[in-house]
Amino acid sequence: MAWTLSAAETAFRNEVREFLSRELTPELRAAGRRCSGIFSDYAEGNGWHRILAKQGWSVPHWPVEHGGTGWTPMQHYLFAAELAAADAPQRAPMGPSMVAPVIIAFGTEAQKRAWLPGIRSGEDYWCQGYSEPGAGSDLASLQCKALRDGDHYVINGTKIWTTHAQYANRMFCLVRTASGGKPQQGISFLCFDIPTPGITIRPIISISGDHELNQVFFDDVRVPAEGLIGEENQGWTIAKYLLQHERGGAWTPMLCARLRRLQAAAGAIADAQEADDMALRLAEAECAIDALEATELQSLRAQARGEPPGIRPSMGKVLGSELRQRLTELGVEIAGPYAAVSLPLDDGLQGDMPVPEEAVFSMSAYLNDRAASIYAGSNEVQRNIVAAHLLAR
């Protein structure tokens, strides 16, 4: 979708483009282009984060007093669009976009001083301890326990699907600190260091061959009670606040970048009938992306007016994740037999490949994105949230 930019917005976009042309090395662009998962591996993603931090752009969405930029919603959108178009590595959101807003909203001044600077600079790398075996979308049924013992909590239990725990030096975690009554009433939000005695991290290799996920085990792990965010047993309120940030944000910059790659790859289809059919299907996908972008731009205007997000994050999560999956399906079809090649496409892969890079990417992205409709709250749950909101009006 085309839109008219003001002179100030055009100048901002040009500033971002100039910065990217100067700072994005060929190696970083390759890492971004070959990242078929949610975000890049630690070395490339956090390395890019540190470059952005030197520019003062690592956490643009934070309040200015904590290191944010004070950009308008449209500037944030343009920034995301230019990053995607330039193949910048996708950064892990667990620190900057997930726990940081929680710390800013609910943390003490001491907690803000302790944790925000390290997130902003890239010195600290966080992971999220939410899901458990048997407690995925039904997060309120979690059983990982934390018992108060003087100035510490003692944690026992396990967390699963813990993305990038193998790189993290800090974790934010939902734990059960009380039982009885509604399950949501006994949950607390804890932050603590990794490694800590009693923590074991075991890898989970996904069907795409990526090591993004882990299971984390806690065996009498003692963590300081000063890591409690908010009040004990009030973690459910904080968790819901965090999930709004996890589901929020614009999907279309990434989708547009993926679509352009597919359009370029489709140009190599030799059979005229197959090429015409794929061109039509790509055009249909482009229309769907344009519709989502129109919705997101409406949300930007609402945000600029100070309106609460409401159900917009849930709507965007459903539409964006399902469009992402649709694009990966088209990518596999375009790749044809090359998509069957078993070649793990990790961010550190160097040099040329013996088969088309886009074909290898297409299968890796397809397999990885099967989870897109599950993570950050399954789409079935998001539809229920949207329905409940509309039926209550």
Image (cartoon, helix red, strand yellow):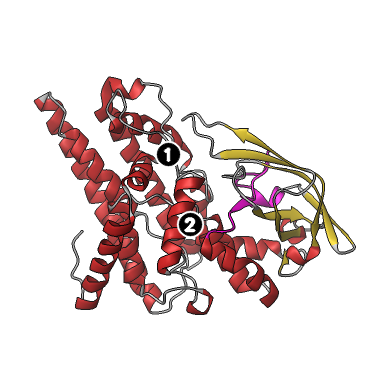
**Amino acid found under the numbered disc labelled 1:** Asp
The disc at residue 60 is none
Q: Position of residue 378 (x, y in %)?
A: 52, 46
Of callouts 2 and 1, the N-terminal one: 2
**Left or right of 393: which side holds 284?**
left
Q: Is residue 141 or residue 207 the one in the foreground? A: 207
The answer to which of 156 and 303 lies nearer the viewer is: 156
Dominant secondary structure of the residues highlighted in magenta in the image? loop
Hey, which quadrant is residue 176 in on the image? bottom right
Disc 1 residue crowd, few under 14, some 14–19, many 20+, Cα 10 Å: many
The magenta span reads 122-141
Residue at left offset 40%, top offset 25%: 343
Q: Which residue is under mark 1?
A: 347
Left or right of 240, for residue 79: left
Taking the spot 33% from the left edge, 63% from the top edge, the residue there is 79
Depth check, mark 2 against mark 1: the one in front is: 1
Q: Residue at 45% across / 36% down in the picture?
A: 368
* Residue 131 falls within the magenta-colored stretch: yes
For disc 2, the marked residue is: 247
Q: Residues within 10 Å of mark 2 (few under 14, many from 20)?
A: many
Q: Element at badge 1?
A: loop
Queried whether the magenta region covers residue 329, the answer comes back as no
SS class, disc 2? helix
Report the label total. 2
Disc 2 marks a residue whose amino acid type is Arg
Q: Name the residue furthest right.
A: 150
